[in-house]
Amino acid sequence: MRRTGLELSSALAVASFIAAAMVAWYVDLPLRDPDGSTGPTYVRLPAIVLLALLLDIVPRAVIRASSWRSVRESIVEVTRERWQLASLRFMLVGLVGWYVTYASIRNLKGMVPFAHHELYDTKLDRLDQAMFGGHRPTVLLHDLLGTDIAAHVLSFFYIVWIVALPASLAVALVWARRDRVSSWWVTAVSLDWIIGVILNYALPTLGPIYDRPADFAGLTHTWTTSLQESMWTERLEVLADPATTHTVQNIAAFASLHVAIATTACIVAHRAGLHRALVQSLRAFLVITMIATVYFGWHYVSDVIAGLLVGIVAAWVAERFAAPEDTKRDEPTSTARPKRAAAHDLASRQGLS
């Protein structure tokens, strides 16, 4: 029986952890906290949970309170209303499951160079050129959009994605809570990660920026440039001394998870009947992400196509296993007419009688 909608998400967390442990044993490397530089997980996760609770409770209590003296009473009142046992369980199960999946996938992705030594960048580069009449799509984009203003604009949206994803999970698990869309979204993101890392192992690549850095030398320096440089430094550090470093390298291009998760967001928002403005914004963000990821050389066009397919599959599977049947949008035209027809028939019968 469906209880929280997070059962599949929890199962994926367990499966991804087991897979990470097995691969770590096979390549003789330890599992690491991918964000260990910001503090241990047993401190960071409770801090995240506490902060999320405070942001959910305190503003509501302040608005409700008639005076500063009554804020404490309002906090107790809001807490009792919003955070009953079922809601707390939903949040904790979702957050812990999300982090376990995230940490496991990051470790699995980081161990790709040690488990599969071949790289397929040359083949994907040829495929890209075949799709664009012998031209590299990155070069075409640089010629079309320029290498200065466009670089800053696209970099902004690309970096925003990094912040938007954990923020969206926090909204789903803390502010929306137990809503059918929340379990659907959290589960779909987990599926995106897991399918994505499977493809990382099936087709290891670096991405154009690392395979052909000269093609991107003309781009103006942006936040994305700094991120790319730091990721390459981390990879070299890991490959040079994998046993002692505390870094988890994060370069594996196929498929594009940015595109996959953005695609999933569009589908979930549309299918769940969320506000039209949000759906249109997400679609625009997906298009910008697809352009940016090729423009900066993170991915090949084939990575983008694969990311679209991954996002579709993740949203479809999550809808069936993590969301109840009523997640489909209501169609007013299909329900309003029968009601009006029934009312008309009833009035007619009453008039005849």
Image (cartoon, rainbow, N blue to C red):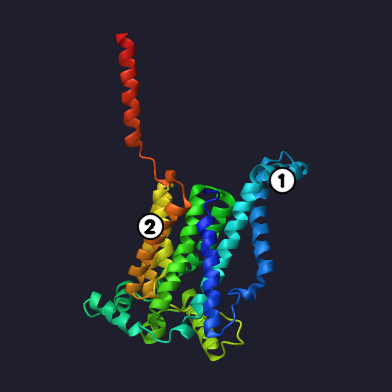
Query: Which residue is at a point 37% across and 76% down the rendered structure image?
Result: 147
Residue 125 quadrant: bottom left
Residue 261 position, x and y percent, is: 43, 63
Q: Is residue 281 above or below residue 210?
A: above
Mark 1 = which residue?
Answer: 75
Q: Quadrant of the C terminus?
A: top left
Residue found at the far top of this picture: 353
Mark 2 = which residue?
Answer: 283
Q: Earlier in the sequence, mark 2 or mark 1?
A: 1
| Element assignment for label 1 | helix
The answer to whether residue 73 is visible is yes
Q: CA distance from mark 2 to mark 1?
A: 38 Å
Mark 2 Cα within 10 Å, few/some/many (few <14, many 20+)?
Answer: some
Q: Amino acid at mark 2?
A: Arg
Residue found at the far left of this picture: 133
The answer to whether residue 273 is visible is no
| Element assignment for label 2 | helix
